[in-house]
Image (cartoon, coloured by chain):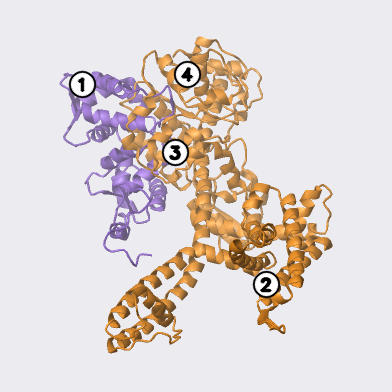
Chain colours: A orange, B purple
Amino acid sequence: MAAGVAAWLPFARAAAIGWMPVANCPMPLAPADKSKRQDELIVLNVSGRRFQTWRTTLERYPDTLLGSTEKEFFFNEDTKEYFFDRDPEVFRCVLNFYRTGKLHYPRYECISAYDEELAFYGILPEIIGDCCYEEYKDRKRENAERLMDDNDSENNQESMPSLSFRQTMWRAFENPHTSTLALVFYYVTGFFIAVSVITNVVETVPCGTVPGSKELPCGERYSVAFFCLDTACVMIFTVEYLLRLFAAPSRYRFIRSVMSIIDVVAIMPYYIGLVMTNNEDVSGAFVTLRVFRVFRIFKFSRHSQGLRILGYTLKSCASELGFLLFSLTMAIIIFATVMFYAEKGSSASKFTSIPASFWYTIVTMTTLGYGDMVPKTIAGKIFGSICSLSGVLVIALPVPVIVSNFSRIYHQNQRADKRRAQKKARLARIRVAKTGSSNAYLHSKRNGLLTEALELMGTPEEEHMGKTTSLIESQHHHLLHCLEKTTGLSYLVDDPLLSVRTSTIKNHEFIDEQMFEQNCMESSMQNYPSTRSPSLSSHPGLTTTCCSRRSKKTTHLPNSNLPATRLRSMQELSTIHIQGSEQPSLTTRPLPTTSNESQGIQGKQKSNATNDSRSSLNLKADDGLRPNCKTSQITTAIISIPTPPALTPEGESRPAPASPGPNTNIPSIASNVVKVSAL
Amino acid sequence: LSLWSDEWPLRSATPTPSPLVPDKIEDELEMTMVCHRPEGLEQLEAQTNFTKRELQVLYRGFKNECPSGVVNEETFKQIYAQFFPHGDASMYAHYLFHAFDTTQTGSVKFEDFVTALSILLRGTVHEKLRWTFNLYDINKDGYINKEEMMDIVKAIYDMMGKYTYPVLKEDTPRQHVDVFFQKMDKNKDGIVTLDEFLESCQEDDNIMRSLQLFQNVM
C-alpha cells in the first residue's frame, strides 16, 4: 500500500460500512488506537539545513532509518532536533520519498554518493520511481563497467593458472595483448594478410615484356615466385584457422561465425586450385574463384576495431539504407522511362531501351556525368536537367537523415531493449510489493491471533509479541479481515513461513498458497508432503480434481467462472501475479541492494516467465485462472501431520511451527485461539 | 517512417485502454484544469461532525492524491484498489463513487467527500443505514431489487480476488443475496424498501454492532 494513500485509510474503512448489512457473521474488533498523540512536527537538521515534516510522514516507512526508532540515535537533546551529518541535497530526495511515496534520482548526483546515502537511510534503490529508474540503472551500469574495467586491467597482469591450454590459446587469439607470443602471432598473421593482398594486386600488373612474346602480367612472368608466396600465405592462414578451431569454446558456433567463414572463403580457392587439374574447361571457373582471394582483406577486421564498428553500423542501419536504395530505384525507373520516351524520336540515340537508360540516370543523378550517353532532343535535355537536379536532392536528403536516424534509432533501440528488460523487473517489483503487503497481513494476523491468545490467557508478555505493525497497518489488516468475514472466503497468498491454517466453515481467513496446494494434494493423495516435488506440481488438472473432490460436486475450477469481463483493470495485474509469485515474504528477507537485484528477481521468475511476460497492464484473464502449484522456495516444515480427512469444512487448526515467540506452549495456545475465535 | 502513411490511423500495439479513461488528451487536460477549493474550515466544521484538526488531516490526504481538488472516478478507483491488492475493487469503488457523488456530476469534491465520511464515521445509526441503502440502490429509484443486490455482492466478492479458500463457487453470491433478501424483505415482494431495510437492520444485533465498528476511525 503506497504511503500517501494511507491518509485515505479512514475513507476505505468507512466505505466498509457498505458490507455490513450483507455480512452474515460478526466482524472482528477494530484495533485500538492507543496513541492519543497528536501529529507533531519534527525537525531534521541535515548539515545545517533544517527540514521539517510531520512525524506520521516519516512513520509511513517503518523499516527505514527515519521511520524507525533508529533516528533516536541522532536526536540532539540540546536543540531538540535530529541532526544528520550528511549531504542535504540527497536528503531532499529522501525526504520527498516519504512525502510522495516516490523516490527520484537527481541527474546531477554521483551514483555512488547517492547509493551510499540511500544505504545510510535504509532505503532500497529498487523503489526508485519509473521516471528516474532508467537513468539510475544506466549510471549504475556504467559505473559497474568502469569498475570492472579497472579490475580487469589489474587482473591482466596476474596469471591464471587454472586455465587449460585450450583456454589460454583462445584468450591469446582474442586478446593479443595478453602475452608476447600472442602479439607475435597477431603481427605475423597481419603481415601475411598484407603480403597476400599485395601479391594479388601486383600479380595483375603488366611486368614488362619477355623478348619474343607479348606483355605479360607479373603473375604469369614470375609464376613460381608468386605461387610460393601464395602457398606460404595459405599455409599460415590454414594453420591459424585450425588453431582457432581447436581453441574455440564452441566449435559449432565458431564455424558459423562470420570471421571463420571469411577465413574459409579466403583459403578455399587455393585448395580447389590444387585439387583441380589443368583442365581447359574448369580453368575458367577457377580463375573466377581466385576473385575470392580478395576476401583476405576482410581478415584485417580482426586487427582493426574500426572495421568492426563500421560493419556493425551498416548492419544496424540496414533499414535506412534499404529505404535509400528503394527511393533511388524508384527515381531511377521514373527518370529512365521518361528519358527513354523523350529520346525515342531522336535518331542514333544511345537510349535504346529503358534498362539502357538506367545507366544514364544513375550517372546523372549521382552527378557523375561520364558523358557517354547524352540526350539530344530538347525534351530529353529538359528532363535530363530535371534528373540531375533531383539527383542531388534524392541523394543528399536521405543521407543526413540516415546519419541522424542511425544515431537516434541506435540509442532508441538500446533504450527500448533496456526498458523491456526493466519492465519485467518493474512488474516483479510491483508484485513483490503487493505480496509483501498481503504477507504482512498474514504475518500480523498470525501475530494478532497469538496476541489475542495471550490476552485471553492473561499473560503479561503480550507486549513482546510482534508489535512490528504500525497502527495504519493494523487498521488495514482489520479492514481486510472484515472483508474476509463478509464474504466468507479467505485470501491465498505465498508465505513460506506461514503455516497456520485456521479454517472453519464460517471463519475463512487469508491463508497461503502452500496450504491451498497441500489441501489439494491431501484430498487427492491422502498424504501430507512437506516438500514440493516438481512432478506433482506440474499437473494443472490437479487442482481441478481436488476442488471437485472436496466439494463433492463436479464443478470445474470455479475460479475460471468468475466474471472475468469485469476485471479488466489494473487490479488484474495483482491477481494474475499471485499465482506465479515465488518470492519469500518481504518481511522475512531483506532484498539485496546490488544492482543485479532486478535481474535476480527476473531469474527467480524465469520459471513463471510465461505467466509474467504479458507485461501490459491489461492482462488476459486466462493466464491467471490456473493457480500455479509451482513453488520452489518453500522452507517450511510442517510439524504435525493431521489426519487425512481434515479437509472437511470443519477443519482443525494446525499449530504454527515457526512462529516467533518466547513461549514454547504457543502452538497449543494457537489451536485454542482458533476455537475461541471460531464463534 | 510515417511519410508514406495516409489517413489510416496506425493501430497501436498496446491494448485499448479502459473506456473510463479519457481517450482524448483534451479531456484529460480539462479535468486537471478544474481546480476546486473547498469552503472554509469553519463552515465545514459546522456542517460535519469532524473537528478542525481532523478536517485538516483529511484534507491533506485528499489534496495529496487529488491536487486539483476533485476526485474523478478513475482516481477514486485507483485509490481504493490500493487497499485491496489481490482483488478487483473497481466495481465496488464504482458504486461507492456514485454514492459519494450525490449530485451525479462525475467528480467528488472535498465537501461531498467529507460529508459522506461524516455520516459514515460519526453519523447516527439511522443516517448510516440510510447511506448504505443509497449505496445499494444503484439506480437510485428508492428500492433495492435482487439484481442490484447481486451486483453489489458480486463486487464485494470481486475484491477478494481469485485465490481464496474455499474457492468461490458460482452460486455463492446468489445464495448470499437470497439470505439477505430473506432477512430484509419483510413482505416478500422481491424488493426492499428503505423502511424494510431500516427495520431489518435494527433487528439484527450483528449489523448494529458492526456499524459502530469504525466509530473512532480518525
Q: Is residue A104 visible?
A: no
Nearer to the camera, B65 or B151: B151
Q: Secondary structure at mark 3?
A: helix
Are tags 4 and 3 found on a single chain?
A: yes
Mark 4 touches mark 3? (CB < 8 Å): no
Mark 2 and mark 4: Cα distance apart in space: 87 Å
**Of circles 3 and 2, which is in front?**
2
Are tags 2 and 1 found on a single chain?
A: no
- Circle 2 residue: A200
For residue A574, the mark is 3
For residue B185, the mark is 1
**Of circles 4 and 3, which is in front?**
3
| Residue density around tag 1, few if under 14, some if 14–19, many if 20 or more, within 10 Å | some
Q: Position of residue A430 (x, y in %)?
A: 49, 44
Q: Secondary structure at mark 4?
A: loop
Residue drawn at point x = 42 percent, y = 67 percent = A323
